[in-house]
């Protein structure tokens, strides 16, 4: 079990990842399951220049997806949303002392009102992060000079570890749905344009994706080698690799048609 300080840091970092990638997940629900290649992180670089900006196309909530094209992404979104909403309910029941008119307050749902759930996943993740970091747990000075009770109590250690567990599980589920978790997979039907060796995509949530060639030092690709001697396309070189692979595929198609 991590120390309380580690649980706070890791839990808050996981919640930030969920917030930052939530729009990507919502867009993934609108699209058929993505192929391994090209990496999802290259989507913004490879979109046509006149395509709409991501922020203008991303719907804000799951209920705006009446006809999902990617059921795995939808299931992941619903699971993450449900987990964080329920976690917020649990934490609020234990530590919330904010008055009813305080905008920082987490409002429970009722049979006729969704409460704070109506604000969506982003707000729930921010609110839970605040509890993880023990924000707003000190008495506050009012305009008349008096002290008001703190809106929240510090999070008990058992709830801190529960919040840490749920946050990391939500992050992991979202990363898997987007193909951004730790994995090593072959680039399908796309041999190296320089030596026809097998290309492998390496992804990690903490690092940009990279691609390696199985041929080794004898490959003539104009990129550095890694510690195993493989030609390696780091993040900045991946757009050039996409162009080279597309050109090689076009040449192969033209040759077959001739």
Image (cartoon, rainbow, N blue to C red):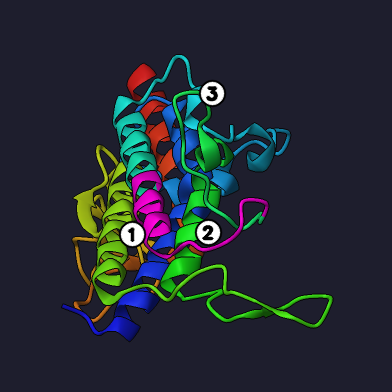
Residue that numbered label 1 is attached to: 167
Residue that numbered label 3 is attached to: 64
Among the 4 quarters of the image, the one containing residue 35: top left
Element marked by disc 3: helix
- Give the percent coordinates (x, y) of residue 162: 25, 63
Among the 4 quarters of the image, the one containing residue 210: bottom left
Image-based side of 48 in relation to 7, left or right: right
Q: How crowded is mark 1: few (under 14 residues within 10 Å), some or many (20 or more)?
A: many
- Give the percent coordinates (x, y) of residue 140: 67, 78
The one nearer the camera, 67 or 195, is 67
- Give the percent coordinates (x, y) of residue 78: 35, 34
Element marked by disc 1: helix
Q: Mark yes or no: residue 183 visible.
A: yes
The answer to whether residue 180 is above or below residue 207 is: above
Range of residues picked out in magenta:
85-101
The one nearer the camera, 54 or 141, is 141
Residue that numbered label 2 is attached to: 126
Residue depicted at 29% across the width and 31% down the height: 72
């Amino acid at each position: 079990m991590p120390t309380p300080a580690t649980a706070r840091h890791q839990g808050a970092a996981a919640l930030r990842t969920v917030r930052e990638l939530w729009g990507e997940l919502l867009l993934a629900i609108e699209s058929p399951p993505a192929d391994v290649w090209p990496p999802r992180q290259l989507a913004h670089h490879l979109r046509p220049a006149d395509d709409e900006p991501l922020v203008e196309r991303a719907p804000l909530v799951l209920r705006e997806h009446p006809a999902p094209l990617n059921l795995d992404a939808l299931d992941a979104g619903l699971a993450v949303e449900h987990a964080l909403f329920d976690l917020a309910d649990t934490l609020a029941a234990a530590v919330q002392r904010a008055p009813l008119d305080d905008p920082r307050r987490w409002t429970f749902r009722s049979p006729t009102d969704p409460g704070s759930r109506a604000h969506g996943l982003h707000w729930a993740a921010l609110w839970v992060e605040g509890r993880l970091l023990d924000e707003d747990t000190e008495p506050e000075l009012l305009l008349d000079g008096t002290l008001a009770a703190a809106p929240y109590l510090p999070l008990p250690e058992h709830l801190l570890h529960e919040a840490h567990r749920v946050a990391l599980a939500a992050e992991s589920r979202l990363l898997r749905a987007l193909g951004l978790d730790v994995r090593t997979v072959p680039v399908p039907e796309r041999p190296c344009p320089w030596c026809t060796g097998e290309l492998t995509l390496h992804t990690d949530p903490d690092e940009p994706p990279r691609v390696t060639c199985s041929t080794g030092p004898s490959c003539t690709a104009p990129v550095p080698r890694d510690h195993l001697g493989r030609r390696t396309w780091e993040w900045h070189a991946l757009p050039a690799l996409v162009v080279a692979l597309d050109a090689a595929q076009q040449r192969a198609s033209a040759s077959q048609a001739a």
